[in-house]
Amino acid sequence: MAKGDTAGKARGKRATPRSGKPAGKTPNTGDLVQLLTPDGDRIDKVTWIDGTEYRVDFTDEEYRGLYRDLVLVRRLDAEATALQRQGELGIWASLLGQEAAQVGSGRALRPQDMAFPTYREHGVLYCRGIDPIMPFGLFRGVDLGGWDPNEFKFNMYTIVIGAQTLHATGYAMGVAMDGRTGGDDGEAVIAYFGDGASAQGDVNEAFIWSAVFNAPIVFFCQNNQYAISEPLERQTRIPLYQRAAGFGFPGVRVDGNDVLATYAVTRAALDNARHGQGPTLVEAFTYRMGAHTTTDDPTRYRIASEVEAWQAKDPIARVKAFLTKQRIADDAFFAEVDEQAKQEALRLRERVLEMPDPKPLSLFDHVYPHGSPEIDAQRDFMARYLDSFEGSVH
Amino acid sequence: MATETLTLGKAINRGLRRALEHDPKVVIMGEDVGKLGGVFRITDGLQKDFGENRVIDTPLAESGIIGTAVGLAIRGYRPICEIQFDGFVYPAYDQIVSQVAKMHFRSQGKVTVPIVIRIPFGGGIGAVEHHSESPEAYFAHTAGLKVVSCSNPQDAYTMIQQAVISDDPVIFFEPKRRYHEKGTVEVDAPLDEAYPLHASRVVRPGRDATLLAYGPMVRTALDAATAAEEDGRDLEVIDLRTLSPLDLAPVYESVRRTGRCVVVHEAPGNVGLGAEIAARITENCFYSLESPVLRVTGFDTPYPAARLEEDYLPNLDRVLEAVDRTFGW
């Protein structure tokens, strides 16, 4: 039998043809937790498929705080994109469109919780109270984005897709081994990744490990519909949240453009983890409004009408509509937030431009914790080599 | 000083036991390391004595073993990971090279990942494919990793403990075909007075030519030196012990005396450690050399079927043949 025949037969046996529309592209309200509609109307509570009830109860001040977060992270992100366009950053990975997923989950973290980001979680970083300048060394190219994960309870950005989910799982195993689960003061871990990463072996291994070791972890998947150019249907045939069932832990899909629902779902999952109830997969259904990074051109692979449809579900506009309808905030408040965002963006710009270039000999630093004779010899060579040029300063 | 006669495998087991006793943050993780004690029994009895939280049977996922070890290290643990066989390390290669190796550098020294990755390596045991490989060059080529290999029970016992207390990530290559060879081990010698981890050592002094080897090939080189005595040649043998960083000062000193050098390893010759060593010796001992540095290595083929491995692997005769060539140059 020719190879082509075999393939044809196998294809014929499939329950659904490959050309069929995959599940998960347009969730029904039945499998999407939403507490704030795109029009800004509040839904009091939502019961997920497994019977879990989600609701939030914020004060007016807290609602205004979430709005402020959303506006600020979008404005800082826009400033970073502009800095890249002006040649001041080598690259930028914009979070545009994913503000609610990041602010909702970021604000759901308790101080003792540990986050393992990808390279796009600028909004989570902001919500952890970290100086937003911190990742800019990486994107400007003056360093590799090095900071102490334990100081900030926020791991370094990880660029290899999905690798950090295993780090998060190991860290969570350590939390359990330290006896730091089981109460309200227990520690939980959150691992960020995307729809593209869901196809990586490391992510699937992380699911397996966290399940068998009952690790206190939340897998927070921002399904922004694209892995650079590849749409969701190239990664999965089922809604991503349903993957969790096969690994033996709960999966929940939340409207990732709804900051309230994202907060509610993430907070509940984290609290389950800290109480020793093991992992949860949260699929935050959202959309990457911008390019994958500043090197990308999304007009080559997606149509304008799709972007426009998501524009109507904007995560910030719906909060603004809600605050206005409920008279929780007025125009003076919105203007004040815009002004604060503008000022913070200006300060960020100034500080990015002031970042010093690294010294040549620093490239030999920190290869090994206690040095290495071979690296020392190469540093000495480089120093002599640089000294051989007239007027060399290093 | 208490000494015991131990096999190389048992010496590693005893070293691991001391490491677990010494530091409660030390954990062992790998496939079958618990109740079974590992397929080579190197972790025999450790889970029974230290519990399932210290000696962890993991899912069969090598990337998972190393990736979770990174997370445990960030949490303050010192994981010792067992990769069951050399040829099974490749699924973990990304985590080792892209994560473990770079963590200290990219964090500007703020994160250390003191992970030991134990890999039984090399051939000569009649195994099926993927069970006899020598992948050390892949790791020695990677900045941020340290790579060592032991060749005898005393070193096995000491070096595994030194690797565990080191803040570096260490790839620890164990010569699996020598696991059953016995030797005396000083079991209560203080670690801080031991011979350094990243140092080569002259294991047989000689005048006429220098043989360099590590891991399983040290025994082969010593046997070749003994046989060469019959030809009236007095060969010096150096056990490299550390593959990254290399410690070649004793090698240069030796080659300046002998003028002749042969590097022996099981790994394929092409772009192997022997090539790097030969280049450095040429740079540092150029005027002392009576012949080019020669290499006796595995061939540049995939590791062959078990019934061909004796033809593939360097042995006493191939080493002596190369020594002869250095004298005939």
Image (cartoon, rainbow, N blue to C red):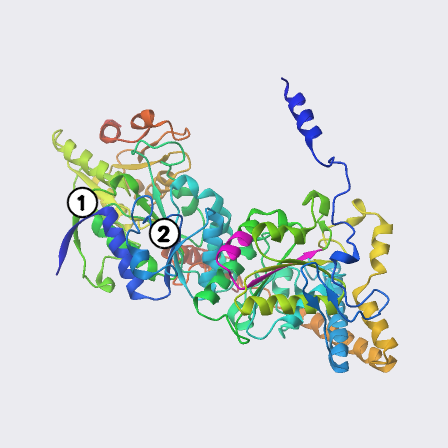
Which range of residues does the magenta coloring cover? A206-223
Check disc 1 and report the residue beneath it. B182
At a point 65% along the width and 71% down the height, the residue shown is A108
Of marks 1 and 2, the one in the foreground: 1
Q: Is residue B4 visible?
A: yes
Q: Is residue A354 visible?
A: no
Q: Nearer the viewer, residue B268 or B175?
A: B175
Question: Which chain hosts label 2?
Answer: B
In front of the other: B319 or A287: A287
**Residue shown at the point (52%, 59%) measured from the top left:** A169
Q: Is residue A279 above or below residue A4?
A: below
Mark 1, Cα crowd under 10 Å, few <14 / some 14-19 / many 20+, is: some
Label 1 sits on a secondary structure element that is strand
Identified by mark 2, the residue type is Pro
| Residue A213 is covered by the magenta coloring | yes
Protein chain holding label 1:
B
Q: Is residue A68 left or right of residue B92?
A: right
Q: CA distance from mark 1 to mark 2?
A: 28 Å
Rendered residue at 77%/42% (across/down): A21
Check the picture and name the quadrant holding the N terminus of chain A: top right
Which mark identifies residue A366?
Answer: none
Whether residue A21 is in magenta: the answer is no
Residue B73: image location, x then y, percent: 44, 62
Coordinates of residue B174 in the picture (x, y in percent): 31, 45
* Tag 2 secondary structure: loop
Q: Is residue B83 above or below residue B14?
A: above
| x and y percentages locating residue B225 in the rendered image | 18, 36
Provide residue B21's location: percent of width, then percent of height.
Answer: 28, 64
Residue under numbered circle 2:
B245
